[in-house]
Image (cartoon, grey):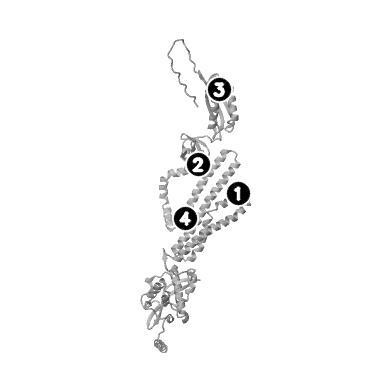
């Protein structure tokens, strides 16, 4: 025991007797502004020099004795520059936790651990070590850290940093250095250009393949994909181009949210396009198969309402998928679910009319009291059903006005639907004539008008002339016609005009006013006015 203690003391005396060598003496004299007296002063001095691009000064804070003397002056600044990039991107330095004492942390004599950086399934320690120079402690980044700088830089350093101008790495705007802004600009420009080119090439390749098939829906699918196909390509290019930019966590998270949002928007956009395409194809096929126009209108109405319902569902799902990417929204969603009972009652009472209108629109598409293209009379207005939504119906009147009627009006109030039983409809014309009128001649004239001038308006089935009333001086003829809902009014007007002209050709057929004369002279009185004939 005494012998071992004596040997230790002798060794210590011999070490003290040996003159201390200079640290990194190949770099030249240590500048006076270099302060390596404590771990904190070394870390702060290195960061200050490196961020001012004074890498020759920053090299004095590295342990370079393991490098040959002839290479220290060249390798020192290069390693200092690379270490600055690695520390800025991969290690958060808590300056308050670094020792300010010249002897360092007593718990870790000889070095101060700043942290670790993962590298190939291992953790590289980043530490500063203490050296004795001229009897004083000097702190520099340890040789184990300096030896791993190149490997760490290859894994986490910015690309092309050796060839790009230094100003791109020394100035930061909005949390990003200039080279990162330049990289983002090139990434977005490449995404836009790549999306356009790849979409164009994809459609060019799919076009001939689609034309080789007998069906036409694949050609329409290619056209529907124009636009939505670009967004996934943008997301793919951004996801490939942005990782080498070494963006901060906030920016990297923002880019990932943007990528996911582009995918959600693309899926929703294509789903809406596909929905329109599918409804159009089904509607055209039904129109070809069903000869009955009423059945075709019924299917068209159901498809229109179903398309609107599915479109609303797609919008809701897409909006939910976009919003659920944010933590705040997810937290609010959980809170809303926790209070769903009370909120459901309140919302149900507040939106009962809106919900009733929405359910009424769905009921209208199922029961179909009206269909698109029907001729209706609602609120004393005659028009054609032009559009059926989930909450209202658009009726186009004869003078091209648009009447917006709530769907509940057609479910709760009576209205006339001239097209409910089909497209055929009967119309009447009242014609007052004299007693001497030849009814058979009027019937022949009616048959001539229907066979020549009104053949496109007449249904070819119903045409009757009947005496429905007889007064003292005239009688009333009722002309009963069969036509179509859309053209019945024009048919009645045309036949009325032709029959009036035909009766006027024989004045004896016109209604007459009988008067008796008793032989007494009276003052002339104005003739009584004859009321116009009723339509």
The residue carrying mark 3 is 505
The residue carrying mark 2 is 387
CA neighbours of label 3 inside 10 A, class few (<14), some (14 to 19), many (20+): few
Q: Position of residue 334 (x, y in %)?
A: 43, 55
CA gap between label 2 and label 4 equals 31 Å
The residue carrying mark 1 is 216
Count numbered badges in the picture: 4
CA gap between label 1 and label 4 equals 34 Å
Looking at marks 3 and 1 on the same chain, the residue that comes earlier in the sequence is marked by: 1
User: Mark 3 and 2 residues: CB-CB less than 8 Å, in contact?
Assistant: no
The residue carrying mark 4 is 322
Does residue 30 appear left or right of residue 385 in this picture?
Answer: left
User: Mark 2 and 1 residues: CB-CB less than 8 Å, in contact?
Assistant: no
User: Mark 2 and 4 residues: CB-CB less than 8 Å, in contact?
Assistant: no
Quarter of the figure with the N terminus: bottom left
Looking at marks 3 and 4 on the same chain, the residue that comes earlier in the sequence is marked by: 4
User: Mark 3 and 1 residues: CB-CB less than 8 Å, in contact?
Assistant: no
CA neighbours of label 2 inside 10 A, class few (<14), some (14 to 19), many (20+): some
Looking at marks 1 and 4 on the same chain, the residue that comes earlier in the sequence is marked by: 1
Q: Secondary structure at mark 2?
A: strand
Looking at marks 3 and 2 on the same chain, the residue that comes earlier in the sequence is marked by: 2
Looking at marks 2 and 4 on the same chain, the residue that comes earlier in the sequence is marked by: 4
Q: Position of residue 33 (x, y in %)?
A: 37, 76
Looking at marks 2 and 1 on the same chain, the residue that comes earlier in the sequence is marked by: 1
Residue at x 57% of width, y 39% of height: 295
């Amino acid at each position: 025991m005494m012998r071992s203690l004596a040997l230790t003391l002798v060794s210590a005396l011999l070490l003290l007797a040996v003159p201390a060598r200079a640290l990194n003496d190949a770099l030249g004299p240590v500048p006076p502004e270099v302060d390596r007296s404590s771990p904190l002063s070394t870390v702060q001095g290195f960061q200050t020099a490196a961020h001012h691009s004074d890498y020759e000064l920053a090299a004095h804070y590295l342990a370079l004795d393991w490098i040959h003397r002839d290479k220290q002056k060249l390798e020192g600044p290069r390693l200092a520059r690379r270490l600055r990039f690695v520390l800025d991107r991969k290690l958060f330095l808590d300056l308050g936790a670094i020792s300010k004492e010249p002897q360092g942390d007593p718990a870790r004599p000889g070095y101060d651990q700043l942290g670790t950086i993962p590298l190939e399934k291992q953790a590289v320690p980043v530490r500063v070590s203490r050296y004795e120079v001229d009897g004083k402690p000097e702190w520099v980044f340890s040789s184990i850290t300096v030896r791993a700088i190149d490997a760490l830089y290859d894994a986490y350093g910015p690309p092309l940093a050796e060839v790009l101008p230094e100003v791109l790495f020394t100035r930061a705007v909005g949390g990003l250095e200039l080279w990162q802004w330049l990289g983002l600009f090139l990434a977005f420009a490449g995404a836009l250009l790549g999306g356009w080119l790849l979409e164009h090439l994809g459609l060019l390749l799919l076009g001939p393949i689609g034309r080789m098939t007998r069906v036409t829906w694949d050609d329409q699918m290619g056209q529907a994909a124009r636009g939505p196909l670009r967004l996934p390509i943008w997301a793919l290019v951004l996801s490939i181009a942005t990782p080498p930019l070494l963006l901060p966590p906030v920016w990297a998270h923002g880019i990932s949210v943007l990528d996911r949002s582009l995918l959600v928007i693309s899926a929703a956009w294509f789903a809406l396009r596909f929905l329109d395409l599918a409804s159009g194809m089904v509607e055209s096929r039904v129109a070809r198969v069903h000869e009955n126009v009423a059945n075709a209108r019924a299917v068209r109405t159901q498809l229109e309402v179903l398309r609107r319902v599915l479109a609303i569902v797609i919008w809701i799902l897409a909006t939910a998928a976009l919003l659920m990417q944010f933590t705040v929204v997810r937290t609010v969603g959980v809170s809303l679910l926790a209070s769903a009972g009370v909120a459901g009652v309140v919302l149900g009472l507040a939106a009962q009319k809106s919900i009733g209108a929405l359910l009424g629109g769905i009921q209208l598409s199922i029961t179909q009291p009206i269909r698109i293209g029907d001729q209706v009379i609602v609120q004393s207005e005659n028009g054609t059903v032009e559009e059926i939504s989930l909450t209202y119906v658009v009726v186009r009147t004869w003078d091209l006005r648009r009447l917006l009627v709530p769907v509940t009006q057609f479910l709760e109030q009576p209205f006339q639907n001239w097209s409910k039983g089909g497209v055929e409809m009967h119309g009447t014309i009242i014609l007052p004539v004299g007693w001497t009128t030849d009814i058979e001649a009027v019937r022949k004239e009616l048959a001539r008008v229907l066979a020549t001038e009104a053949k496109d308006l007449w249904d070819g089935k119903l045409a009757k002339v009947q005496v429905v009333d007889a007064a003292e001086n005239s009688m009333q003829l009722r002309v009963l016609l069969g036509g179509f809902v859309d053209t019945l009014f024009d048919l009645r007007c045309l036949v009325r005009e032709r029959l009036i002209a035909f009766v006027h050709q024989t004045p004896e057929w016109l209604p007459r006013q009988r008067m008796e004369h008793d032989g007494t002279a009276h003052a002339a009185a104005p003739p009584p006015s004859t009321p116009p004939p009723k339509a």
